[in-house]
Image (spheres, grey):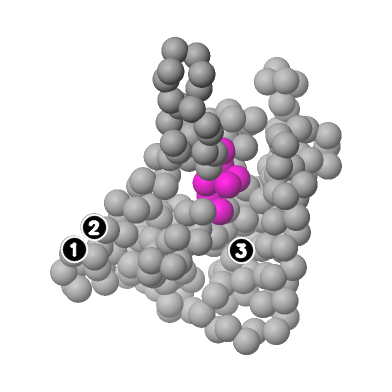
Amino acid sequence: MSFDPPSSAGGTKPPAVNLPPLTLALLLLMLAVYLGLLLASPRLERLVFVHFGFIPAAYLAHDWPIWSLIVAPFSYVLLHGGVGHLALNGVMLAVMGQVLERRCGRPWFLLLFAAGAVGGALAHILTDAASRIPLIGASASVGALYGAGLVLHRRGVSLGPNARVLVALAGLFVIMNLLGLMLPIVSNIAFAAHLGGFVAGALLATRLDLRRRS
């Protein structure tokens, strides 16, 4: 998220929040879903979390809707459990999105975001296959952006003037989630899912060819 001083040319001012369109759209979608569920009835809210959140045990059930099993590995990243949860993921998405969407292009950026969701879901089901608690939140997709940013930086791709800060944040993301996984003091955070998203983004970034965008 960049905040630029007023332009001297013609006295015009650039937008106060200068986020690329897809990053902004994802942020607004996450906010709209959160606000919509605040206004929804408790029954509707529960149905949304159950069928659009990612529940590993649902894949062992015989009567679970097929459409939910297909959609949930992607849709859970749009759901959040509180203002703090939404704000943290939103800030991290804005920080990484403003760099990677412009550097990689919208199709690759969206693919990275989706790959992080799937990678997080896969890691979660591998580590807690019997869980009946819905996995929610965009942390795995944000993790994919961190993973991609770290790999691209190591490949010599410019991530702008704040590249070192982004790399440091990526390292901190990994360290904190590894510690959470090995020392499960906080039980309601899916550390494995976060790391699964990170790995998915890092692997995908190794296939990303930015020569035509240099």
* Badge 2 amino acid: Gly
* Disc 2, SS: helix
State the CA–CA distance, disc 2 to disc 1: 5 Å
Q: How many marks?
A: 3
Q: In the figure, 134 relative to 174: above or below?
A: below
Tell me if residue 114 is in the magenta stretch.
no
**First in sequence: mark 1 or mark 3?**
1
Tell me if residue 95 is in the magenta stretch.
yes
State the CA–CA distance, disc 1 to disc 3: 29 Å
Residue 202 in view of the camera: no
Please report the residue visible at 53 percent of the width from the left and 49 percent of the height from the top.
Answer: 93
Whether pointer 2 and pointer 1 mark residues with C-beta atoms closer than 8 Å, the reply is yes
Q: Which residue is mark 2?
A: 36
Q: Which mark is residue 139?
A: none
Q: Residue furthest top?
A: 10
State the CA–CA distance, disc 3 to disc 2: 25 Å
Residue 213: x %, y % from top left: 68, 20
Residue 59: x %, y % from top left: 45, 68
Q: Nearer the viewer, residue 6 or 161?
A: 6
Q: Which residue is mark 3?
A: 194
Camera-side mark, 1 or 3: 1
Q: In the figure, 12 relative to 80: above or below?
A: above
Q: Main secondary structure of the magenta part?
A: helix
Residue 7 in view of the camera: yes
Q: Which residue is mark 1?
A: 39
Q: Residues within 10 Å of mark 2 (few under 14, many from 20)?
A: few
**First in sequence: mark 3 or mark 2?**
2
* Segment tinted magenta in the rendering: 92-98
Q: Residue furthest bottom?
A: 185
Q: In the figure, 51 relative to 188: above or below?
A: above
